[in-house]
């Protein structure tokens, strides 16, 4: 872990603050636009109270500010610390395996890795689409339209949850999770055709496995020194003249 100087801390703070302010303004603008358009388009939306509408606008700005501030912080760290681009052996093995997948397989893997954000996004999207369709019915009250839209959204979300459960079951059968066995190219094969099985660890955060690679590298150095000492001892023994009594 690198200790930041006071100047670096201030620069990092300024970059994060700038990103947060930019994201907040973008979120407020987008939220206000959506609320204004919904107020003009949907009669049911006009029935909402002013505090609730204000909350929708400010929450959009807050959410966008948090996301943009985090991205600005990460971008500053990546630009000032080259070690942020370090990739451990497990990450390289996973990337090598993913590079050999087809487009369909990559799409499946992306869906498997992002299953829970997909569930959340599908609920929000289905709620909006269902409410837009139900709002055309002039014979329902605002509360009835919301209930009807929620029923449709829950139906789609349930289908997505079932698909997610199927992914979970499949991963459990295949032994996927924090540790996973993947097929990678044999580094000792000069023709790079032979595949070997390697057990890799999925990082919970970037750089989690750095210590593993450092320990493995140190163990290889120790093993190399031991082999060098053994080879030198064997060379000395073979160079000694054979002892014996002369007649």
Image: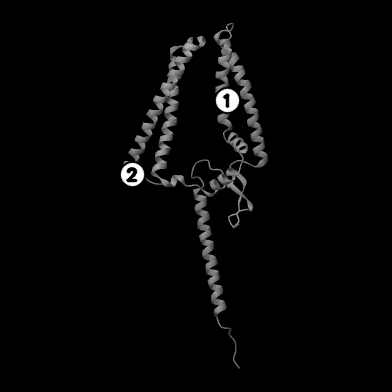
The residue at 58%/36% (across/down) is 110
Where is residue 45? Give x, y as percent.
50, 12
* Residue 135 quadrant: top right
66, above or below 146, in the image: below
Asked which colour scheme the image uses, the reply is one colour
Q: Is mark 2 on a helix, strand or loop?
A: loop
- Residue 210, compared with residue 66, is above or below; it is below
| Residues tagged 2 and 1 counted as in contact (Cβ below 8 A) | no
- On screen, residue 3 versus residue 121, left or right, reads left
- Residue sitting nearer the eye, 71 or 193: 193
Q: Which residue lies furthest to the bottom in this view?
A: 247
Residue 247 position within the rendered picture, expressed as x and y whole percent measured from the top left: 61, 93
Residue in the image at 40% along x and 45% along y: 81
Question: In the rendered view, does 114 fall on the left or right side of 81?
Answer: right
- Horizontally, residue 48 falls left or right of residue 104, namely left
Helix, strand or loop at label 1? It is helix
Q: Gap in Å between the C-alphas at discs 2 and 1?
A: 44 Å
Residue on which the image places disc 2: 5
Residue picked out by circle 1: 122
């Amino acid at each position: 872990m690198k200790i930041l100087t006071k100047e670096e801390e201030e620069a990092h703070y300024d970059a994060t603050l700038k990103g947060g302010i930019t994201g907040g303004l973008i979120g407020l603008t987008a939220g206000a636009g959506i609320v204004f358009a919904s107020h003009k388009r949907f009669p049911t939306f006009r029935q909402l109270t002013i505090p609730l509408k204000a909350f929708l606008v400010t929450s959009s700005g807050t959410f966008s500010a948090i996301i943009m501030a985090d991205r600005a912080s990460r971008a500053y760290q990546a630009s000032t610390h080259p070690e942020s681009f370090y990739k451990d052996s497990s990450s390289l093995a996973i990337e090598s395996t993913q590079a050999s997948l087809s487009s369909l397989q990559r799409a499946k893997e992306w869906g498997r890795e992002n299953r829970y954000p997909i569930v959340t996004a599908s609920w929000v999207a289905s709620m909006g689409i269902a409410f837009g369709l139900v709002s055309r019915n002039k014979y329902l009250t605002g509360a009835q339209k919301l209930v009807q839209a929620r029923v449709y959204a829950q139906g789609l979300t349930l289908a997505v949850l079932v698909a997610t459960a199927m992914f979970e079951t499949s991963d459990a059968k295949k032994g996927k999770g924090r540790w996973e066995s993947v097929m990678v190219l044999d580094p000792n094969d000069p023709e790079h055709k032979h595949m070997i099985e390697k057990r890799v660890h999925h990082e919970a955060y970037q750089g989690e496995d750095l210590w593993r690679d450092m320990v493995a590298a140190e163990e290889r150095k120790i093993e190399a020194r031991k082999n060098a000492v053994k080879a030198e001892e064997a060379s000395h023994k073979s160079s000694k003249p054979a002892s014996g009594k002369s007649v």
